[in-house]
Amino acid sequence: MNNKISKTRLSAMNYYYRNFSLDYFLDSVSQDGLTNIELWTSPQHFWIEKDGHQDVKELKRKVAAHHLQIICLTPQQSNPNPYNLAAKDERLRKGSFGYFKNLIDSAVELNVHLVALNSGWDFYDENPAEAWDRSVAMLKKVADYAKDREVKIAIEALQPDESHLVNSIVDLKHYLKDVNKDNVGVNLDLGAMARNYETIAQYFESLGEKIIHCHFVDGNPVGHRCWGEGERNPGEDFNVFNYYGYQGYFTFEFGQSKYFLNPAETERKALRFLNPFLK
């Protein structure tokens, strides 16, 4: 079986570069020979608010100068961020819709056709079904806005300590059915997948071509670890992705706090480990 993928399908993410400047991130990624980035919209790198977003001209210039392309935008959206699909307070719901509209407008201006979202989070003292309904209703609106602008949305499962809404393959199927928008697909996050004792094959058997993106991490079995620090076998993982004909990108989303101190070396370590499986 084919256990290799092209390095051109790997994507770095500024999430683990959060303590460094955007310029440092772009320099490092370019020096590592990567060609793609997934842009996490932290205000220190690229700000988006409910009322507007940063002008894209300078960002586009810098990305092009480093011979990179942005393949996905991922906003700040998990607890305790107020803007999320399941926001409860009416003021926050209005703000959340404005926030996601500006995310999509930014994607269009940056010539990016994918944004990565999650279902949002519920209050622990409410019935999760109420938050589910709020999330579905909001995503329907956001998806309609995105479709008119030729942008797709990739939804990922979250771990149960992050949200009680979408944690599993079953939840994702139910959620996509309720949203019922053809420009909404799945972001297969290996960390959340492993936390729920699921496999890549099970994702594809259940969700098939709905899988349009991947957050590609190692783990023990979870932990959003750098490749080479966990138990996963990337050759076996690539075999499965290739078997099911996956054509999307593989984004590094290394989440351990120690990585934030030296993200460039973390990235290089991952690439050294993955190199035998790249072409």
Image (spheres, rainbow, N blue to C red):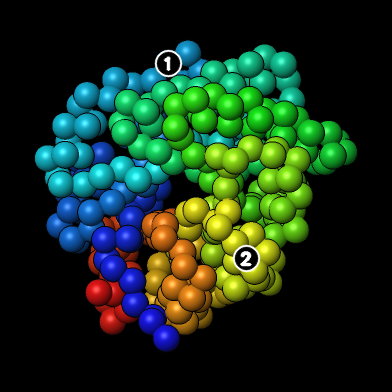
> Is there a contact, CB below 8 Å, between mark 1 and mark 2?
no
Q: Quadrant of residue 271?
A: bottom left
Q: Tell which of 97 and 124 is nearer to you.
A: 97
Q: Residue at x 49, y 25 (%)?
A: 148
Question: Quick one: which residue is furthest to the bottom in this view?
Answer: 1
Residue type at mark 2 is Tyr
Residue 203 bears which disc, if any? Answer: 2
| Element on which disc 1 rests | strand
Image location of residue 34, percent across then percent down:
23, 58
Q: Is residue 219 placed above or below 123 in the rendered structure? A: below
Label ID, residue 52: 1
* Residue 161 visible in rendering: no
Camera sees residue 9? yes
Image quadrant occupied by the C terminus: bottom left
Answer few, some or many: residues within 10 Å of disc 2's Cα (few below 14, many 20 plus, some between 14 and 19): some
> Is tag 1's residue or tag 2's residue first in the polypeptide sequence?
1
How many labels were placed on the picture?
Answer: 2
* Residue lying at 60% horizontally and 66% vertically, measured from the top left: 204
The alpha-carbon separation of the residues under discs 1 and 2 comes to 36 Å
Side (left or right) of 183 relative to 238: right
Query: Which of the pair 229/29 is nearer the observer?
Result: 29
Dot 1, how many residues are within 10 Å of its Cα: few (below 14), some (14-19), or many (20+)? some
* Identity of the residue drawn at 65% across and 20% down: 92
Q: Position of residue 130 (x, y in %)?
A: 83, 34
Residue 186: image x %, image y %? Answer: 57, 51
| Left or right: residue 64 compared with residue 187 | left
* Residue at horizontal 31 percent and vertical 43 percent from the top: 70
Give the label, 1 or 2, closer to the camera: 2
Q: Quadrant of residue 33?
A: bottom left
Which element type, helix, strand or loop, lies under badge 2?
A: helix
> x%, y% of residue 253?
43, 56
Rendered-image quadrant of the N terminus: bottom left
